[in-house]
Amino acid sequence: MKKFGTKQVMPLLLALLAIVWLVVGLGEFGFWVEGTGPSPAFVPTIVSVLLLAMSVIQFIRSFKEAPSKYHKDEFLFIGALVILLACVYIIGMLPSMTIFLLVWMKGVEKAPWSHTLIVTVGTMAVLIGVFAIWLQVRFPMGIILDTLL
């Protein structure tokens, strides 16, 4: 049997996440509301079942593959996502996404300011217009904005 490493740990973590989503979704919302149709947990439940199945398959297949080799850029992206999640918790989703886009495009991708601003403004317009206004998705406000508002 090969060494136990990240190729085995990641599918196990994703399977655990899928189980949590499944339990919370079905426990709090159910799958189907009698007489009205799908519950709010309908799609998350389906996604969590698929994630669980794919995680189990990947865990089994992982013992047949070569060990992983990681590069600096992969850790840069993972670190950026961790910082983004922390910022969402502190200052909220929309300000965090704006800062992330500006920093990533200008700092990492080395895009010119014109491209950076066009992509950032376009992305924020879609997020706010489609999700916040049209679909009325409530984005996390963060600790600071919750305190101020």
Image (tube, rainbow, N blue to C red):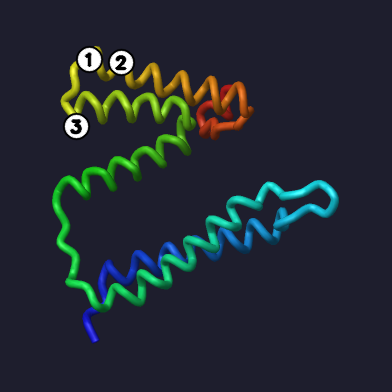
Percent coordinates x, y for residue 38 in the rendering: 72, 50
Q: Quadrant of the N terminus?
A: bottom left
Percent coordinates x, y for residue 124 in the rendering: 44, 21
Secondary structure of the residue carrying numbered label 3: helix
Q: Is residue 58 above or below residue 135?
A: below
Dot 2 amino acid type? Leu
Secondary structure of the residue carrying numbered label 1: helix
Q: Is residue 107 above or below residue 36?
A: above
Percent coordinates x, y for residue 134 in the rendering: 61, 23
Percent coordinates x, y for residue 47 in the rendering: 53, 55
Q: Closer to the N terminus: mark 1 or mark 3?
A: 3
Gap between marks 1 and 3 measured at Cα: 13 Å
Image side of residue 78 versus residue 11, left or right: left
Image side of residue 145 versus residue 77, left or right: right
Dot 3 amino acid type? Val
| Res. 113 mark | 1
Disc 2: which residue: 117
Dot 3, crowdedness within 10 Å: few (<14), some or many (≥20)?
few
Dot 1 amino acid type? Trp
Give whichever of 100, 32 is nearer the camera.
Answer: 32
Disc 3: which residue: 108
Q: Are marks 2 and 1 in contact (CB under 8 Å)?
A: yes
Image side of residue 100 versus residue 129, left or right: left
Dot 1, crowdedness within 10 Å: few (<14), some or many (≥20)?
few
Image side of residue 33 versus residue 16, left or right: right
Residue 4 found in image quarter: bottom left
Q: Residue at x 65, y 51 (%)?
A: 41
Residue 107 found in image quarter: top left
Gap between marks 2 and 1 measured at Cα: 6 Å
